Amino acid sequence: MSIKRSIEESIKVKQAILSNSELLSIIEKVAQTTIAAFQNQGKLYLCGNGGSAADAQHIAAELSGRYKIDRDPLPAEALHVNSSYMTAVANDYSFDLVYSRMVKAFGNENDVLFAFSTSGNSKNIVNAVIEAKKLGMKTIGFTGQNKSSLSEICDYLIAIPSIDTPRIQESHILIGHIICDLIEIEMFSK
């Protein structure tokens, strides 16, 4: 694949997002849901595998550190950052349970879970959403366009109009940044 073609394909997916008013509305609702959680002493937890884990950690850092505005930190954490926990639970139980056990340990009804899975079918991510819903948490799925397990169970679904993993992940981080921007503007610019 040529460099130019990769860039053109990325732009094409972003143009499809831009022209999808329903998806844009969902992004706004996710930002407002997350703001409401923070305002009610809730926390944001994020999970994913591989590149999606990196995206989860990236967005957590933007919120717990700062995005664009010098402001107080927000309680956001990627669930995979404790490697001792992750390897112990994967070894002693199953990798399918690494996130759901963490959600069960720390999640509360005022919290939000961002669940990143390009396929929408990663068992450990699906299990985390199921556990979060039991606790009354708001659940946000970040997936690709295909119907999936997450599309059936999440409160909100940010389904990127693509089946190509790199294009999906590029769009997830773009939308994650947009959500960070909306949160900072609403909570700290007034």
Image: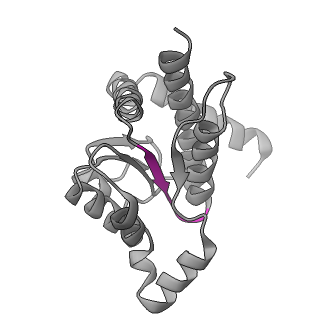
Residue segment shown in magenta: 43-50
In the image: residue 132, left or right of residue 12? left
Residue at far bottom of view: 92
Frontmost residue, 174 versus 7: 174
Locate residue 26, reporting x and y percent.
34, 30
Q: Is residue 122 above or below residue 58?
A: below
Q: Can the viewer see residue 141?
A: no
Q: Residue at x 42, y 60 (%)?
A: 119
Percent position of residue 2, x then y: 77, 47
Instruction: Answer whether residue 182 is magenta in the image.
Output: no
The residue under the point 51% across, 8% down is 190
Outermost right residue: 3
Count of all numbered marks drawn on residues in the image:
0
Please give the name of the residue rendered at 60% of the width and 69% of the height, measured from the top-left corner: 82
Q: Position of residue 33 (x, y in %)?
A: 34, 32
Give the camera-side residue of 58 and 168: 58
Q: Residue at x 39, y 76 (%)?
A: 97
Q: Is residue 73 left or right of residue 18?
A: right
